[in-house]
Image (cartoon, coloured by chain):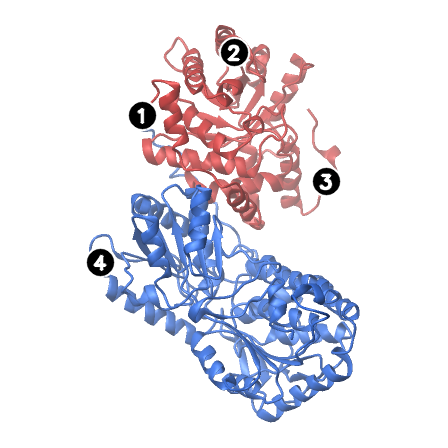
Chain colours: A blue, B red
Amino acid sequence: MVKVPETAASAPLFDYAPAPESRAIVDIRSSYGLFVDGEFVDGQGSSFKTVNPATEEVLSEVAEASDADVDAAVKAARRAHSRVWGRMSGRERAKYLYRIARIIQERAREIAVLETLDNGKPIKESRDVDVPTAAAHFFYYAGWADKLEYAVPGNGAPQSLGVAGQVIPWNFPLLMLAWKIAPALAAGNTVVLKPAETTPLTALLFAEICQQADLPPGVVNIVTGAGATGQALVAHPDVDKVAFTGSTEVGRRIARTVAGTDKKVTLELGGKAANIVFEDAPVDQAVEGIVTGIFFNQGHVCCAGSRLLVQESVAEEVLDRLKRRMATLRVGDPLDKNTDVGAINSAEQLARITELARVGEDEVGTTGGAGRWSPPCDLPERGFWFPPTVFTGVSQAHRIAREEIFGPVLSVLTFRTATEAVEKANNTPFGLSAGVWTEKGSRILWMANQLRAGVVWANTFNKFDPTSPFGGYKESGYGREGGRHGLEGYLK
Amino acid sequence: MTASDASLRRFLHGLPGVDQVGCEARAAGLGTRSIKTTAKAQALDLAIRMVDLTTLEGMDTPGKVRALASKAMRPDPADPTCPAAAAVCVYPDMVATAKDALGDSGVHVAAVATAFPSGRAALDIKLADTRDAVEAGADEIDMVIDRGAFLTGRYLQVFEEIVAVREACARPDGTAAHLKVIFETGELQTYDNVRRASWLAMMAGGDFIKTSTGKVQPAATLPVTLVMLEAVRDFRAQTGRMVGVKPAGGIRTAKDAIKYLVMVNEVVGQDWLDPDWFRFGASTLLNDLLMQRTKMTTGRYSGPDYFTLD
C-alpha cells in the first residue's frame, strides 16, 4: 500500500524569489514638526528618532510635544470647534470625511509602505487590512454625519462634546487613528491626537492628507511624543473627551487622571482572548483561524487569540496540523509581498516577549508533551525579531496563560466539556474578544451568551468592520468603537 | 467501512466539515503570493510539464488529435529547452491516433471514459468504454463518478463503480492504466461533498482525483482544489499512499496556474510538485504559459500569432 514518491528528493525546491515592494513611492522627511492649526510647526520641546524595526535604520526625527505645544494644539482645536466645525451642518462635515476617505484610497500604496517601514508589519497586511479598513471607517462615519439624530435615542439632534484628546498605540497606527478620528469628526468634535512614539509617521502623513482635503485648520491636530505628551493631553483642562487605546496599565493611569472631572472617557485596553476549538470544528479552517488569531500582525493585537482552548479529543490532531501550518509561515523582510510575519515593533517589546517566553519555558516544563516550539526559521541579524512560538501543556495558573504577551506566542490549553471551556475562557481579568470553532450552530449561540467578551467570533477570527462595535469587558476597558455605538462616546 | 451505504455514510459524514468562508479566504490569501523572476521561470516550466493538453469536442478528428500531439511534444518549436506537456487528453476513439502520434516521446495519452461527461450509462457500458481505451493504448483513464448516486447517498454504488473501473484499467501484462476520478465539483455544490467524494475515490483506489469535466460551470476553482489537496494530504498521513490532484477546466492563464502551484507548495508540500502528482486539465492554458516563458527569456511580449494554435 505504501508508495514512496521517487521524485520527491530530487525535485528542486520551489523557492519564492524576493518580491519587495518599492519604497521609492514614499518621501520621508528627515525631520517632522507638530501639526497644529492646519500647519506643521516646530515643537518647543526636544525631538526623538523613529526607526524601522526590521533594520534599526533611523527613518526620521520627530518633535516631542511639550506641555505648551499640547496647550497650543488644544486651543486650536477649541477655536476650530466653536467657530467652524461644531457649527457646520452634518452634511458639510460628511463631504470632508468622504474626501479624506478617497484620498486614503488614492494614496493607499504610499501609506501602506510607510506603515510597514515604521511599524515592521508585513506589507501584505498594511496593504490588504490596515489601509483599506482605515478608509472604510472614514466612509462609514461620513455616512453618519448628517444622521446623528437617528444614532442615539432621545429627542432632537445630539450635540458634539467639543475637543477630543486621543492617544493611540503602535500596533495599527493608521487604523487606530481612523477608529478615533472618523467618529469624532462625524459627530462634530475636533481632535488632538497623539500617535505612539515608535510609529508617528503615518499620523503625520495623515496630517498632510487633512491639508490636501482642505479640512479647516484646527479640526485635526497631531502632537507626537511619548508618555509625558500623552499625559499632558489627557490632563488638559479644556479637553472634553479622552479616548485611549493601549495597555491596561496606562489605561488605569488615564482613568485616575480624569477621575473627578467631567471628561467623557473611552478606553480600549489589553486582552487575553480564548480561541476555543471544539471536536466538531471545521479543522482546516480552525487551524487557519488559530494562525490568524495569534500570528497576524506578529501578535501585536489587543484582541489576539493568545490562548488556544482545544477539546481534549482532538488536541493532538489540531496541534499537529497547527505545527505543520506554522512551518509554512514566512518570517522576514516586511516589505516583501510574500512575508507573513514581520518584525517586532521595538526593542522594548521584544525584550518583554522574550522575558515572558522564558518564564513560560520554566513554567510548563518538558514533561507529558509540554514545552515550547517554533518552526525552523532564519531570522534576520539586524532588527527586532521573534519566531512564531507555541507553548503546549499550559494551565490557567501559568503567567503565559494570564498576562498579555502582545507577541507571536500562543499558549495551548485543553478542555473536556463546553462548560469547562467557558469557565477557562472567562477566567481572566480581560474580556475583549473570543473565538468559537464548531459546526454546531446552537453551540455557537450558547457560547456567545456565556462568554464575557466584547466580540465573539464564530468560525473566524480577527475580522474587523466599521459597522461592528468593538470594545471590552472588565480590564479590557469600556466604551465601544465602531458602528452606531462608536458615535455615543462623542455625543451628548 | 465499505460494507454498506450506511457505514460509508457514517465515515464520510464524520470527516471534519469545511467552513465555506474560511476555505475561500485561505484560497484567496494564497492567491496573493507574488511569484517573480527565478521562481516564476521555475513555476512556468513546471506548469508546462503538468499540462494535460485536452481536446474533448464532438468535432474532434484524427488530424486535430495529431496536431495536438505534436504541440504536446514540442510546445514551443522555436525553443528546444521548453519542456513537453504531461499528456494529451482525448475521447477513447482517438486514443490509437494519439498513441501513434506520440510514439515513445514520454508524453502520455489520457482517455476520458465511462460515458464522459455525464456518466449516465449502464455499468457494463462504462466498463467496455474503459477497456476499449486501455486496449487502444491509453496510459491514463479519466472516469466520471455517478453524481446522481452520490447526491442521493448511494455511496456504495459510487465506490463499487470506481473499483470496477479500476479493475477494467488492468492490462494483460499485469500493469494498469492510471485512474483519475472526476467528481464534477460544480454539480456536487458544497465543499463538504467535495471532501467526501475525495475520500470515497481514494479509498476505492483512484490514483488521481480530478475536479471537473470542463463541460459544467463552475469547473476547477482554487477553493475546491484546496479541499482536495487537504484530502490527499490527510489520506497519505493515514494510509501512507499518495494520490494525485488534477484541477481541470477554467484555468486559462499562467497567473492562475502559478496560484495553483503556490497552493500545492504550501498546503501539501514539495512532494506533489511533480507531473506524477499534480496536473492541469486545460487547452488554452499552454499558450499563455509559453507566452510568459518567452517574455521571461526575451524580456518582451510577443503577439499571439507567434504561438501555435492547435
Whole-Å distance between the Cαs marked 2 and 4? Answer: 59 Å
Question: Is B125 left or right of A351, judged from the image as shown?
Answer: right
Instruction: Please determine if labels 2 and 3 lie on a single subunit.
Output: yes
Amino acid type assigned to the residue bearing label 3 in the image: Ser
Q: Are marks 2 and 4 in contact (CB under 8 Å)?
A: no
Question: Is A249 left or right of A27, judged from the image as shown?
Answer: left
Q: Which residue does the numbered mark 3 point to in the structure image?
A: B302
Instruction: Please determine if labels 4 and 3 lie on a single subunit.
Output: no
Is residue A434 placed above or below B303 in the rendered structure? Answer: below
* Rendering quarter of residue A449: bottom left
Q: Are marks 2 and 3 in contact (CB under 8 Å)?
A: no
Q: Are marks 4 and 3 in contact (CB under 8 Å)?
A: no
Q: Which residue does the numbered mark 1 point to in the structure image?
A: A1
Q: Which residue does the numbered mark 2 point to in the structure image?
A: B133
Q: At numbered mark 3, what does the secondary structure look like: helix, strand or loop?
A: loop
Instruction: Please determine if labels 2 and 4 lie on a single subunit.
Output: no
Along the polypeptide, which appears first: circle 1 or circle 4? 1
Q: Indicate the chain on which mark 4 is placed.
A: A
> How far across and how far down the image is residue A274, in percent?
39, 58
Q: Are marks 3 and 1 in contact (CB under 8 Å)?
A: no
Q: Indicate the chain on which mark 1 is placed.
A: A
| Label 2 crowd bin: few (<14), some (14–19), many (20+), radius 10 Å | many
Return the residue nearer the eye: A460 or A66. Answer: A460
Which numbered mark, 3 or 1, is in the foreground of this view?
1
Whole-Å distance between the Cαs marked 3 and 1? Answer: 48 Å
Which numbered mark, 1 or 4, is in the foreground of this view?
4
Q: Which residue does the numbered mark 4 point to in the structure image?
A: A366
Whole-Å distance between the Cαs marked 2 and 1? Answer: 26 Å
Q: Is residue B309 visible?
A: yes
| Label 4 crowd bin: few (<14), some (14–19), many (20+), radius 10 Å | few
